[in-house]
Each structure stands twice: as structure tokens, then as C-alpha cells.
Image (cartoon, rainbow, N blue to C red):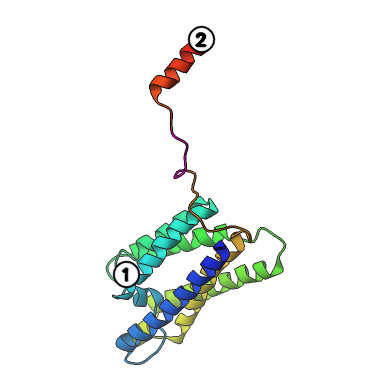
Amino acid sequence: MKFRTAWLYAWTALLLLCIIALVDVSGKTCNKHVPILLSRALTTDPWRGVILVFNLLAVGSSFELNSALMFTGFLGFLCAFLVSMFQTNAHNALIFVSAFCIMYECYPTSSDNVWSIHWWSTVVFGIACSAWLMYSEYVCTTDMCAECSWWYITEYLFFWSMFLLLLWKIPEDKELRDDLDFINMPPVQSTQKTNSKKKEMMF
């Protein structure tokens, strides 16, 4: 299977997962279906387990791109959902650093205007999302304002658009297969054989 096709399927599954989790948790949090923080929905059981599986698969697939930043980004998202967002700031810090890594790695490297528009629109969504989160954290005085707001849609658009950006980094002809160098390394010769060859070369 083409890597691009596999990632598009995975992104579609992520989209459906987020929508189902949001509908489920928002009804319990707001007593009606109003947008809530995406992390709040995805760190609520049973959705936490499903998003952890998705991020684990994303970490594995990042090796195919041979990118340390991409691997760091997906590993950061995996760790972010392992910690509780309600007890420490670790969750927020991991989300911020991971998003920065992926956005940096997905910066347009060609003259494709569609790629540039996609990247910059994601940045706009991210700025709008950050502004709202700062407002809800330090200005809002009611629980409903901080927990339930249509402004959280900017967060959904940012993260969905960011994960879709990865399509631009995947070569069109790249197949998804397990051919990592550190898995298929040739057998290492024993120290004894190596030393013997060195002695032969000396004589």
C-alpha cells in the first residue's frame, strides 16, 4: 500500500474518532453538544486508549520519513495523552513542543502554492486557537466560558489540518513497508574474525 494512502486512511479514522469523542464527552461536560477542548475529550476513557494506539502507530510510521523532528513530534503526542491534563502542565507543554516540531518539519519546501496555503492556514488556525486558550485560561470567569465554546472549533481545525500536512512530506511513490535500516542491518562480524583480518593485513 502507498504510504500516502495509508496516512489518508489513518487521518480519516482520526477525524471520526475525534468527532465521536467530542459528541460523547461534550454532552456530559456541557449538558448539551457544544464544542469543548479536544484534549479534554481525548483524555476521557475510553477515548484515551484509542488515541494512544493511533499515536503509537504514528510514531512507528514516522521512521519511514527518516525525520528526527517528526519522530519527536509524534512521540510527544503519545506522551501527552499518557499524562493527565487536569493535574499538571506536562500535557500542554508536550502538545506545544510536538506541534512545533511537526509544523517546522512540514514547512513548504517547494513552489507548490496549495502546500503553502495549507501550511499558512494551519498557522492561522493555531494562532486563533492559542489566543482563545489564553483568553479562556486567564480572562474567562465562568466554567461554561472556559469549558464549552464554539471557539474550540479553531483547535479542531488546527490539529486536523496539521496532521493532514504530513501528506506533503510523503513521496508519491513511497510504499509502506517494514524496511528500516536498524531492523535489516547485516550481521556484525565477531571481534575475533575482525582481529584475524587485521593481523593478515599487517603481514
Q: Disc number at residue 65?
A: none
Horizontal and vertical percent position of residue 192: 39, 20
Q: Main secondary structure of the magenta part?
A: loop
71 within the magenta span: no
The percent coordinates of residue 56 (x first, y second) are 39, 61
From the image, tell me which residue sits under label 2. Answer: 202
Q: Describe the element under mark 1 as helix, strand or loop.
A: helix
Residue 4 or residue 85, whichever sits in front: 4
Tell me residue 188's x, y (percent).
43, 31
The 10 Å Cα crowd at callout 1, few under 14, some 14 to 19, many 20 or more, is some
* Mark sitting earlier along the chain (2/1): 1
Could you tell me if residue 100 is visible in this image?
Answer: yes
* 89 over 196 or under it: above or below: below
Q: Residue at x 32, y 71 (%)?
A: 48
Specify whether residue 135 is in view.
no
Residue at disc 2, secondary structure: helix
Tell us which disc is closer to us: 2 or 1. 2
Q: Relative to 133, say whether 99 is above or below.
A: above
Figure quadrant of residue 58:
bottom left
Q: Locate residue 146: give its quadrant.
A: bottom left
Which of the pair 150/186 is nearer the observer?
186
Which residue sits at x=52%, y=66%?
6
Q: Which residue reaches farthest right?
A: 111
For disc 1, the marked residue is: 49
For the image shown, how many numbered marks are present on the structure?
2
Q: Which region of the structure is painted magenta?
A: 182-187
Query: Which amino acid type is marked by label 2?
Result: Met
Q: Are marks 2 and 1 in contact (CB under 8 Å)?
A: no
